[in-house]
Image (cartoon, rainbow, N blue to C red):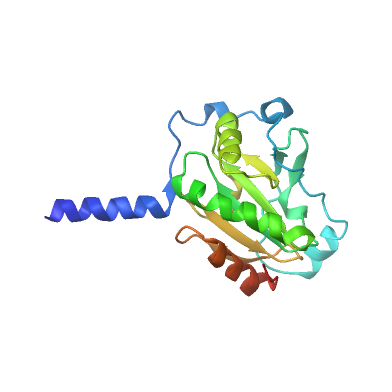
Amino acid sequence: MGAILVLAVAAAIALVSCAGTPSGGTEAAQTSNAGQFHGSGFAACPPAARTAAGNAAKSAGQRLPAVPLTCMDGSGRSVRLDQLTGRPMVVNLWASWCQPCGQELPAFARLAASAGQTLVVLGVSTKDDPGRAVAAGRDVGVRFANVFDPDVAVERSLGRTNLPITLLIGPDGVIRHVYAGPVLTDAALAQLVQQYLGVPVR
């Protein structure tokens, strides 16, 4: 009976979060260029805000790392997430090999569609294979902007090891909340956005 209970607990934990390396390792994810994401269907990444430097000087608090990551729209453009300030932002760290990530990605797609210009929704494909990441996004209808993070720079900066992770970030670039709980539904995600960013979601 004890062994059965241990197995049940382990299975429940696996459904809540994903950790470790995907099968096949990360060797295929060490390079990221425009060709690997050509035709991905992901939107262009938002531009750096002109007020980024001023906001950084005025507001104290944890921010996204100052690391250039490739935008997955096929342009090959690099963006620094710490410079994407000016609007409230929801950032979701996910991977194609993470089952809970796939379960909640459609909620982020619907949030991006309903929020319009009031909110930036950005995905961070973490420790993944470029082709698998694009295919996974297509499978669940993801069209919002994504960046590629094969070296887990964002996850490391947060001191976390399990996916998915959702960040609620204010217009000043400061992380207001880090969520790493059960799979997010539309209602739960809308509640987080309202509570930490003050943005009502229809």
- On screen, residue 136 versus residue 61, left or right, reads left
- Asked whether the viewer can see residue 105, the reply is yes
Relative depth, front residue between 60 and 86: 86
The image quadrant that residue 171 belongs to is bottom right
* Residue located at (61% from left, 43% from top): 141
Q: Quadrant of the N terminus?
A: bottom left
The total of numbered circles placed on residues is 0
Relative depth, front residue between 136 and 18: 136
Q: Position of residue 46 (x, y in %)?
A: 79, 49
Residue 24 vertical placement versus 111 (above, below): above
Q: Position of residue 177 (x, y in %)?
A: 59, 67
Relative depth, front residue between 71 and 81: 71
Residue 175 vertical placement versus 73 (above, below): below
* Residue located at (77% from left, 54% from top): 84
- Asked whether the viewer can see residue 91, the reply is no
- On screen, residue 152 versus residue 53, left or right, reads left
Q: Position of residue 130 (x, y in %)?
A: 60, 31
The image quadrant that residue 62 belongs to is bottom right
Q: Position of residue 101 (x, y in %)?
A: 50, 48
Q: Quadrant of the C terminus?
A: bottom right
* Residue located at (13% from left, 55% from top): 2
The residue at the far left in this view is 1
Residue 113 vertical placement versus 97 (above, below): below
The residue at the far right in this view is 50
* Residue located at (45% from left, 28% from top): 24
